[in-house]
Amino acid sequence: MSQADGFDAVVVGSGPNGLIGAVTLAEAGLKVLLVEAADEFGGGLRSGQLTGLGGFTHDWCATALPLARASAAFRDLSLPVEWAFPAVQAAHPLDGQDAVLVHRDVAKTADGLGSRRDALAWRETVGAAARGGFGLVDSLLSPLSPPPAPLRLARYGVFGGLPATVLGRTLFGGERGRAVLAGMAAHSMVDLHRPITGGYGLLLAALAHQVGWPVVRGGSARLAAALVGRLAEYGGVAETGHPVKDLADVPQAGIILLDLTPRQVLGVCGERLPVRYASGLRSYRYGPGVFKMDWALSGPVPWRDPAVAGAGTVHLGGTLGEIARAEAEVAAGGLPERPYVLAVQPCAADPSRAPAGRHILWAYCHVPNGSTADRAKAIEDQVERFAPGFRDLVLARAVHDPAAMEAHNQNLVGGDIAGGYSGLTQFVRRPVLTPRPWRTPLPGVYLCSASTPPGGGVHGMGGHHAARLALAERTGK
């Protein structure tokens, strides 16, 4: 391609952030080219027959998408996808007792925590965050902008800034409330003894009440396809099989958005970057990786508590103390015997993902970045712990270690699905500390990946912020 192609903007990478960035620019009237190195669009929003059995649709990465329902980047798009909601948004099995179930209804969830004190604590913290509405969500997903709901954010921050271990033991007297908060907080992939991990848990739990934890009927790839379709409606052009190794590999344009992590940015921009900025990118810290498994099953998972079958997402790890120890061991470079396992049952909401009567399941555990250890047995042991006889239902399985995850999507450096360490030190210093982290020192070149605020998750806000900043600087407003 050449400058004669006449593109006003080029977006490199078609993950959720790149797609939202491209749509935002095209909606503003710019002629946009979106290029993707892989043979299909979507990044973490891709689906396929991963186990090799026909009729089973597995998602490569993201499945339950509460942030896509809640974020400002997605809310007003009215995309042509069908959302499917499980009967139970999330479940947390425990040894020797019924699982903790997180419903859309705050009161029903609170009443399942086992004590009046803990039920009240849930209503006054998680329930209050859910009642905070989109103003609170927008404040949290735009951490460098004036918050639209400052009082709600301040109240949230009293608890959200705490480590999950401290918050769980402060709020709840019983193990049920503590455990379910830990399961939510461990999505952060951060040691739960660290600050702000409590906030991750509160937000995700609140979203279960506010918007639910739905899946896209037919597979997450359909959400990516809908965004590509919207880009085309606005006159944009999208191409797969177009790797970008250097900025010279794309047409010259006034705006270039890079849905890339710092490692790829260094490769693409090379010596064009100022030494100090390049040094900042080199010091960027990636977080733990994931070891992921997908299964095709002959029937539903035989959970010890049958109510767990209705849950879209299941947190396997036991008590707060057990989960915190496992995550701390990973953060220190170790491999816990009983890892925290995040499992998703898409068929609980969308039976079309498997042939009639059959099911799919995927799960991952956290591992040190770039780990080569085989964690398949450890993951399946945790599933068997709460669903004895699970292995007897396995028709086929697919295993993806950190190297396989990165080979599928180069942004998953060392298997890190969050685009970088998500603790306090990199909450806003993503990838460097600046009031406008989406802007690079190169004129017209912006970053829009999960390595920019507000970080990982299918919310599209990195692309939203980068595109809006680029448009503002283009017009001088």
Image (spheres, rainbow, N blue to C red):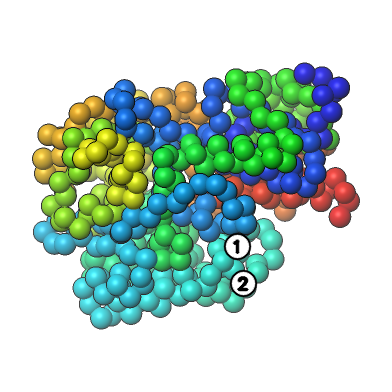
Secondary element type, mark 2: loop
Residue at left 11%, top 40%?
389
Q: Position of residue 39 (x, y in %)?
A: 54, 22
Dot 2 or dot 1, earlier in sequence: 1
Task: Give the spatial CA distance, label 2 vs label 1.
Answer: 8 Å
Give the residue at x 70% y 46%.
24
The type of residue carrying mark 1 is Asp
- Write the residue at 15% across / 39% down: 390
Q: Quadrant of residue 357?
A: top left
Residue 249 visible (yes or no): yes
Q: Give the quadrant of the N terminus.
A: top right
Residue under pointer 1: 138
Q: Position of residue 463 (x, y in %)?
A: 65, 45
In this rendering, does residue 437 appear at all?
no
x, y (%) of residue 197? 43, 57
Answer with the quarter of the image where residue 374 lies: top left
Give the numbered dot on residue 149. 2
Please name whichever residue, 153 or 7, is drawn nearer the observer in this view of the structure: 7
